[in-house]
Image (cartoon, rainbow, N blue to C red):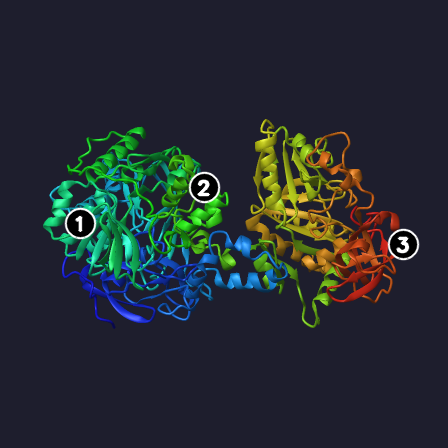
């Protein structure tokens, strides 16, 4: 272990010195304390170099103390829990933490790719747009592989994430975002009125800037005041305080997205605890109190390790008792930075020099600095820095240049309110000359802004503004708000002189530290015409890094404004979008991963089918019985052939519960169905079912199925398994958007009903033993639909439908009765040798019968292609009718639906094979169509197929080649009608 905490103050801070924590960085062991962040612990241990820049691989150190950190991106943990690109400034230290630097090779101290800095004159803004244009042949062979290898930051874990993530929805009257002085007062004021309040703060220690404040509030040190307020809030039953939680997005209807880092501060989550939790917060009102971000000043060498934001230096000293260095200098343009350095000096930080671009500074501040023996340089600018890590500065003063010894330079160019969330509904921030910053413009409905986030600087002002905004929100919600009890804190005047860029500085002057964008790059964008803020952003990548330009956007805009001669508000600003800070994909997915990504749905007869020895297969989200093998059968084909033969000879049973089932009720259902189906349904008689085809708006077939009319205003629609959700969504759209005036109510009842099909010559005999009523041909004719009971009183719906081409019925009962129905049917059919069959046998029989299914309903076929042209009504309008008449969809050369059988009956057909005329070369130009479905027909004794071929119905009897380039096979086939068995339909009407 290195010398422990050589840069740690002997006293002070909010760390718990009684609880030391061991951690490592790049394999070296260090020690910190509870209450440290990884960044503060590194600084306390004298670690200044923490990473390498993205493009030039320049050495980089810690700059900030919060989420705005652009440099200190590290890799945490190892193995399956390895997490790249984590900001050291917001990483809560824990015992055993493993951290590693990234974007370097072979080591952080010696990075081979740092040679890129010598190529910087050639790697400026837009170089990739200009450099890799010639020769074009080298793009895929050389340029792209090299660029992809060099791109990216960090390494993702190569193993599956062992942790789990939660999603939670919570409701409140008032959501307060940020637990700084304004946020705490807003939450406390509203909470005392009785409003339900949620206070979300991204830090593990609520209090915001109060935790780094040196003064007293209400006769308590500022951190103690924050802790007192938080304790009161947590004691109230109507308040929820969520720590380690970042509100990252504002969405519609008062909905906010937030990410809680539940276990990121632990080596691994505790049992039954998630790693992270995604909150969906629904608030009647919200107060944004996210504070403000300090801006740097751009000058030569401003990226050297040891150059930091002044507020960050103050935070590390006051909150963490960590010294960023042993010789601290300040370079600023505002009084607030002076006060921070004076407070840090009083706390024990070795502040030596105060450098200010201004000539006139508050005399009281100058006197206080000089009284402490600090050197003051006014009208001065830092023009260069020195050392691998900072060891000195070159300062330009009115009397010339001089060298100033410093290992830490605290920089402050002012403060930018954190307006990000106010822009998530498209609102644009507006420029405020008084503070030289953008402040919120129009906000999302229900959101107000308090404190520094709206440009109210000064501790006392923030406390009052937060209380006022909390009271306003509570009163707007109808609560009686007692007079806010706001502590009196005297604020010093705000004084700042806008200053952005030291134009005479030496060396690269960085605007965006994370993306290596320099002031020179902004100048190149200006020269080449990319002056619009959106073009500037994309041409230079300014503000496009993971920090969203928190410390760089305004400075970059100011430099562009000076080049164009326009003001900053005239130059404009980009708009911020969610998320405010990066959100892990694991949190967004929650439990929806692996098998839970789309949970497997089991049919009501699943356990019964398992008992029967079924082999299951995933069909969409469902697990269905594929076939039921018996002992001695050598392969699946023998099993399926047995099942098909049994059905056609006697009777078989299959669960078809997975078909989509939609209940439609209302006086206008018939008219509605007429508009969504190509064929008519308004005249459908009660007790009858009808096959229908549904088109998309572009005229292509969406789905097919049957709809039965159970009562004058009650219909039941079935859809294919694959399209159940899509069809329901389509119908809802039609009702809610296209025809909201129709009296129609929809409900998906797919899970409410088990549905079992029986088919075969003895199907009626089996049904008669289970049904409680008459199921004769007269009582239940073909395409009939009746309601009744089965099994001695179980509510049922009986449909006489057939997908197999045999006499068939479908029996629907409540889902909980599905397994009982299957057992009852098996018992009733035992005399006839009833056979359970799976979807493979069903597929064989539908191909033998020539029915279309998913392979043909591919989203590329029309009703005419599939032989349904005569079904399409010419007496009514329906969705897709006009678009279906387009020339391309009515071209007689379009592939149409027909059957195929091999000329050599011993040959096997292959789905996906393309059709070519005899003797034609296998080229796209000669492609005639393709085979959509194939099956071995035990009835015919050979393979058969269905497919689409040009002018198919006109070419019955013609021979063509079925060419399968994937398997390297080719077979001669004969075009035939698609119905191979009982084309007249005698069996199903028997």
What is the crowding at mark 3: few (fewer than 14 residues within 10 Å), some, or many (at least 20)? few
Q: Which residue is mark 3?
A: 957
Say whether disc 3 or disc 2 marks the residue closer to the N-terminus.
2
Q: Is label 1 or label 3 in front? A: 1
Position of 106 with respect to 483 (left or right) is right
Q: Position of residue 282 (x, y in %)?
A: 38, 40
Say whether disc 1 or disc 2 marks the residue closer to the N-terminus.
1
Residue 912 falls in which quadrant of the image? bottom right
Residue extending furthest toward the front:
399
Q: Which residue is mark 1?
A: 376
Query: Is residue 939 something one can see in this rendering?
Result: no
Q: Position of residue 969 (x, y in %)?
A: 78, 66
Q: Position of residue 908 (x, y in %)?
A: 79, 65
Q: Vertical placement of 686 versus 596: above or below?
A: above
Q: CA distance from mark 1 to mark 3?
A: 101 Å
Q: Is label 1 or label 2 in front? A: 1
Position of 914 with respect to 335 (left or right) is right
Q: Residue at x 54, y 53 (%)?
A: 129
Say whether disc 1 or disc 3 marks the residue closer to the N-terminus.
1
Q: Nearer the viewer, residue 44 or 171?
A: 44
Q: Nearer the viewer, residue 774 or 555?
A: 555
Q: CA distance from mark 1 to mark 2?
A: 37 Å
Q: Which residue is mark 2?
A: 533
Label 3 sits on a secondary structure element that is loop
Residue extending furthest toward the top:
741
Residue 448 falls in which quadrant of the image? top left
Q: Nearer the viewer, residue 329 or 941?
A: 329
């Amino acid at each position: 272990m290195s010398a422990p905490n050589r840069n740690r103050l002997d006293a002070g801070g909010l760390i718990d010195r009684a609880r030391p924590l061991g951690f490592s960085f790049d394999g070296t062991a260090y020690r910190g304390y509870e209450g440290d962040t990884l960044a503060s612990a590194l600084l306390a241990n004298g670690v200044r170099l923490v990473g390498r820049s993205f493009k030039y691989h320049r050495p980089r150190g810690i700059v900030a103390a919060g989420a705005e950190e652009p440099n200190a991106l590290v890799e945490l943990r190892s193995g399956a829990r390895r997490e790249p690109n984590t900001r050291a400034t917001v990483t809560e230290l824990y015992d055993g933490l493993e951290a590693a630097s990234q974007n370097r090779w072979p080591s952080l101290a010696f990075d081979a790719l740092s040679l890129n800095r010598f190529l910087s004159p050639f790697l400026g803004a837009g170089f990739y747009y200009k450099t890799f244009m010639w020769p074009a042949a080298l793009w895929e062979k050389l340029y792209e592989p090299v660029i992809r290898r060099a791109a990216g930051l960090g390494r993702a874990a190569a193993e599956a994430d062992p942790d789990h993530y939660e999603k939670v929805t919570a409701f409140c009257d008032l959501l307060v975002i940020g637990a700084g002085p304004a946020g705490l007062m807003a939450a406390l004021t509203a909470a005392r009125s009785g409003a339900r309040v949620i206070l979300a703060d991204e830090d593990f220690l609520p209090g915001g800037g109060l935790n780094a404040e040196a003064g007293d509030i209400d006769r308590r040190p500022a951190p103690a005041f924050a802790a007192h307020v938080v304790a009161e809030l947590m004691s109230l039953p109507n308040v929820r305080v969520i720590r380690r939680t970042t509100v990252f997005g504002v969405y519609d209807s008062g909905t906010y997205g937030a990410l809680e880092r539940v276990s990121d501060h632990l080596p691994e989550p505790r049992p039954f605890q998630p790693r992270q939790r995604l909150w969906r917060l629904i608030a009647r009102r919200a107060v944004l109190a996210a504070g403000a971000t300090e801006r740097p000043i751009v000058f030569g060498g401003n990226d050297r390790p040891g150059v930091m934001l002044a507020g960050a230096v103050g935070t590390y000293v006051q909150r963490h008792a960590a010294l960023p260095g042993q010789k601290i200098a300040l370079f600023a343009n505002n009084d607030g930075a002076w006060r921070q350095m004076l407070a840090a000096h009083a706390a024990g930080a070795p502040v030596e020099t105060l450098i200010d671009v201004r000539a006139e500074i508050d005399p009281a501040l100058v006197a206080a600095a000089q009284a402490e023996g600090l050197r003051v340089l006014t009208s001065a600018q830092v023009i260069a820095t020195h050392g691998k890590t900072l060891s000195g500065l070159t300062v330009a003063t009115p009397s010339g240049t001089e060298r100033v010894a410093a290992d830490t330079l605290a920089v402050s160019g002012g403060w930018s309110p954190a307006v990000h969330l106010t822009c998530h509904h498209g609102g644009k921030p507006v420029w405020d000359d008084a503070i030289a910053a953008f402040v919120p413009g129009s906000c999302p409905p229900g959101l107000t802004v308090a404190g520094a986030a709206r440009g109210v600087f000064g501790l006392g002002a923030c406390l009052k503004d937060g209380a006022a905004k909390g009271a306003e929100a509570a009163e707007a919600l109808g609560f009686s708000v007692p007079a806010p009890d706001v502590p009196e804190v005297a604020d010093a005047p705000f004084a700042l002189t806008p200053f952005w860029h030291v134009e005479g500085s030496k060396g690269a002057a960085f605007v965006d530290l994370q993306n290596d964008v320099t002031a020179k790059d902004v100048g190149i964008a200006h020269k080449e015409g990319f002056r619009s803020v959106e073009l500037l952003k994309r041409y230079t990548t300014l503000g496009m890094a993971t920090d969203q330009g928190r410390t760089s956007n305004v400075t970059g805009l100011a430099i562009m404004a000076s080049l164009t001669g326009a003001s900053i508000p005239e130059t404009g600003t980009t708009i911020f979008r969610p998320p405010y800070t990066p959100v892990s994909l694991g949190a967004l997915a929650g439990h929806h991963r692996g098998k839970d990504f789309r949970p497997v749905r089991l049919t009501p007869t699943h356990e019964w089918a398992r008992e029967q020895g079924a082999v299951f297969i995933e069909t969409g989200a469902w697990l269905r019985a594929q076939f039921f093998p018996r002992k001695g059968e050598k392969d699946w084909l023998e099993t399926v052939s047995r099942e098909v033969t049994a059905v056609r000879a006697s009777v078989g049973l299959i669960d078809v519960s997975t078909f989509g089932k939609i209940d439609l009720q209302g006086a206008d259902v018939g008219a509605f169905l007429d508009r969504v189906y190509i064929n008519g349904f308004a005249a459908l008689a009660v007790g009858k079912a009808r096959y229908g085809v549904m088109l998309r708006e572009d005229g292509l077939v969406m789905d097919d199925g049957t709809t039965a009319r159970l009562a004058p205003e009650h219909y039941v629609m079935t859809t294919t398994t694959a399209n159940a959700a899509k069809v329901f969504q389509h119908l809802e759209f039609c009702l809610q958007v296209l025809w909201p005036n129709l009296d129609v109510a929809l409900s998906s009842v797919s899970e409410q009903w088990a549905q079992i099909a029986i088919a075969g010559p003895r199907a009626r005999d089996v049904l008669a033993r289970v049904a409680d009523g008459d199921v004769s041909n007269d009582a239940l004719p073909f395409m009939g639909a009746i309601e009744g009971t089965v099994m001695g009183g179980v509510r049922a719906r009986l449909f006489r439908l057939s997908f197999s081409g045999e006499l068939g019925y479908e029996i629907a009962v409540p889902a909980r009765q599905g397994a009982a129905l299957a057992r009852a049917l098996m018992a009733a059919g035992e005399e006839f040798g009833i056979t359970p069959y799976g979807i493979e046998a069903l597929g064989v029989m539908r191909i033998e019968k020539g029915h279309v299914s998913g392979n043909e309903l591919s989203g590329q076929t029309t009703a005419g292609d599939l032989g349904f042209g005569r079904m399409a009504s010419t007496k009514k309008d329906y969705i897709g009718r006009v678009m279906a008449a387009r020339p391309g969809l009515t071209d007689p050369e379009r592939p149409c639906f027909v059957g195929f059988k091999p000329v050599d009956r011993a040959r096997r057909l292959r789905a996906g094979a393309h059709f070519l005329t005899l003797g034609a070369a296998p080229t796209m130009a000669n492609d005639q169509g393709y085979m959509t479905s194939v099956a071995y027909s035990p009835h015919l004794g050979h393979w058969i197929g269905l497919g689409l071929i040009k002018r198919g119905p006109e070419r019955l009897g013609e021979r063509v080649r079925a060419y399968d380039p994937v398997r390297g096979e080719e077979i001669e086939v004969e075009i035939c009608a698609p119905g191979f068995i009982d084309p007249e339909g005698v069996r199903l009407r028997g």
